[in-house]
Image: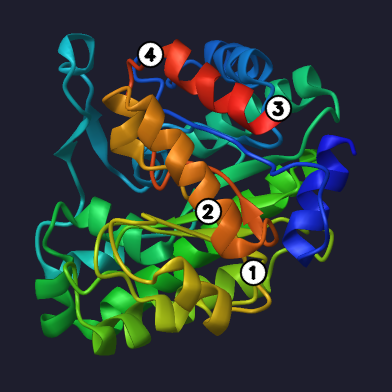
Amino acid sequence: MNKFERIQSALKGEPVDRTPYSFWTHLAGIDLDPVKLAEHTYDFYKFFDLDFVKSMANGMFSIEDFGCECDYSEIPVGGVAKLAKTVIQCADDWDAIQPIDVTKGAYGRELYSLRLLLQKVNAGAPVIATEFSPLTTAEKISGGTLLEHIKLQPEKVKRALDIIAETTIEHAKKAIELGCSGIFLASQMSSVDKTTVEIYKEFGAPYDLKVLKNLPKKAWFNVIHLHGNNVMFDIAKDYPIQAISWHVWETEPSVADFMAQAPDKCIVGGLKRFDVTNDHWDGLLETIKKMQQETNNKRLILAPGCVIRYPFNKATLDYVVTAMQN
């Protein structure tokens, strides 16, 4: 099987010649340069012989063009990007969120990097574009005040979410036109640790669905990532997507519950990220075997439950690759 055939078979629950796999990390300090980002992502894909490539976009790219400024000064010393300035100072300020041109600014930067990456991969493997759920982007824009603003000005927030969703759709369409096989929709708000099920059903899910339902039909590999613990799997399992990513083994659902409750979906996950960062090779091998047994090696694409922290030990991931390919 080639990589496309292997991924497509896994998504459909059909037999595979071996379990497909992929990894991703953050390339902090590199991911603001579209050329370097494409080069490093390609090198990462080739080094580990990945079955699909998830774009490793800068985690703040979806907010910059909405009037936000980000502080990257701590990146060189191991820190994270921070919101330095936002147009949202109070609940009424959501009116400031206006439609943008996704071919320019930070969104355009990501499209340019994707174009370069796709040229390098040259149809050797599926590439999926990272997008953030509208509610995730809104929370980042707000600097943590979103839930308060939902209570004060729910309609203003909904209007902004609608614009953010339209922006996400347009960006995803452009990525798919370039040659991406689908999107990786990262949702950092679909957890009861972040908000309530009721709020998510009103302010999260409708906009997730707007994005997913408006993807081009040729987008055949779409994944939603449910970030964190206590995720809203009961909502996401009915989304019109092919696969779900979550922190498998760290939080519900169990693999058995997933297989029973989402019979038309594929797992993208199963590797314990802390086994990777702590170089627990025996634990990784045990987990791989357990995932294969519990899924009968169907509807499974082995991957980390979340991004692998950088820097990492290449030998540890290479060990996983050897285990998968032998």
- The alpha-carbon separation of the residues under discs 2 and 3 comes to 16 Å
The quarter of the rendered structure image containing the C terminus is: top right
Q: Earlier in the sequence, mark 3 or mark 4?
A: 4
Q: Secondary structure at mark 4?
A: loop
- Residue 34, percent across and down? 55, 19
Q: Is residue 252 above or below residue 125?
A: below
The residue that label 1 is drawn on is 241
Q: Earlier in the sequence, mark 2 or mark 4?
A: 2
Looking at the rendered structure, the kind of residue marked 2 is Met
Q: Residues within 10 Å of mark 4 (few under 14, many from 20)?
A: few
Q: Earlier in the sequence, mark 1 or mark 4?
A: 1
User: Which of the two marks, 2 or 1, is nearer to us in this view?
Assistant: 2
The residue that label 3 is drawn on is 326
The residue that label 2 is drawn on is 291
Q: Secondary structure at mark 3?
A: loop
- The alpha-carbon separation of the residues under discs 3 and 1 comes to 30 Å
Q: Nearer the viewer, residue 274 or 184?
A: 274
Residue at horizontal 24 percent and vertical 59 percent from the top: 139
Looking at the rendered structure, the kind of residue marked 1 is Ile
Q: Quarter-wise, where is residue 146 in the image? A: bottom left
- Residue 33, percent across and down? 48, 15
Looking at the rendered structure, the kind of residue marked 3 is Asn
Residue at horizontal 68 percent and vertical 70 percent from the top: 214
* Residue 21 as seen in the image, left or right of residue 70: right
User: Which of the two marks, 3 or 1, is nearer to us in this view?
Assistant: 3
Residue at horizontal 41 percent and vertical 20 percent from the top: 27
Q: Nearer the viewer, residue 17 or 31?
A: 17
User: Which of the two marks, 1 or 4, is nearer to us in this view?
Assistant: 4
Q: Secondary structure at mark 2?
A: helix
Q: Is residue 283 above or below residue 116?
A: below
The residue that label 4 is drawn on is 313
Looking at the rendered structure, the kind of residue marked 4 is Asn
